[in-house]
Amino acid sequence: MDELRVLSSKLERELKARIDDLNAEISRYPGPIARCDAQLGGLLEERSRLTHLAEALREFEASPEIFREPA
């Protein structure tokens, strides 16, 4: 189970780093920002997807081990 914790922590760090990168890229996006802009829309979608994935990972980490699928 320690290996699962290590992998989970590594994934969480990688997700946070990518979300931080996306936030920085979005904050530098030139204005005025049109919501119909395909590139911006893609960045916002990716950030949302990764944020949901990070939340699901935190929920998994918080779940009791007895509720997890055996490996």
Image (cartoon, rainbow, N blue to C red):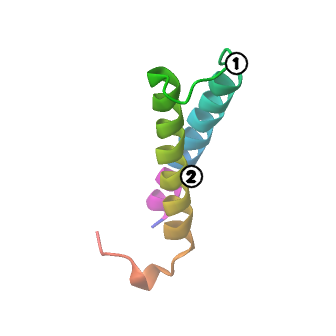
Amino acid type, mark 1: Arg
Q: In this view, does 36 lie above or below 49?
A: above
Q: Which residue lies furthest to the left in this view?
A: 71
Residue 4 drawn in magenta:
yes
Task: Identify the secondary structure beneath mark 2.
Answer: helix
Q: Quadrant of residue 24?
A: top right
User: Which labelled disc corresponds to residue 28?
Assistant: 1
Q: Mostly what secondary structure, the magenta segment?
A: helix
For this view, does 1 lie left or right of residue 69?
right
Q: Is residue 13 above or below residue 65?
A: above
Name the quadrant of the N terminus: bottom left
Disc 2 crowd, CA 10 A, few/some/many (<14, 14-19, 20+): some
Name the quadrant of the C terminus: bottom left
Disc 1 crowd, CA 10 A, few/some/many (<14, 14-19, 20+): few
Name which of mark 1 and mark 2 comes first in the sequence.
Answer: 2
Expressed as whole percent of the image width and height from the top left, the position of residue 68 reads 38, 77
Task: Identify the secondary structure beneath mark 1.
Answer: loop
Expressed as whole percent of the image width and height from the top left, the position of residue 60 reads 49, 68
**Residue in the picture at 59% in, 30% down:** 22
For this view, does 63 lie left or right of residue 17?
left
Range covered by the magenta-colored residues: 2-8
Expressed as whole percent of the image width and height from the top left, the position of residue 41 reads 49, 31
**Residue in the picture at 64% in, 26% down:** 26
Expressed as whole percent of the image width and height from the top left, the position of residue 19 reads 60, 37
Residue located beneath label 2 in the image: 9
Residue 41 drawn in magenta:
no
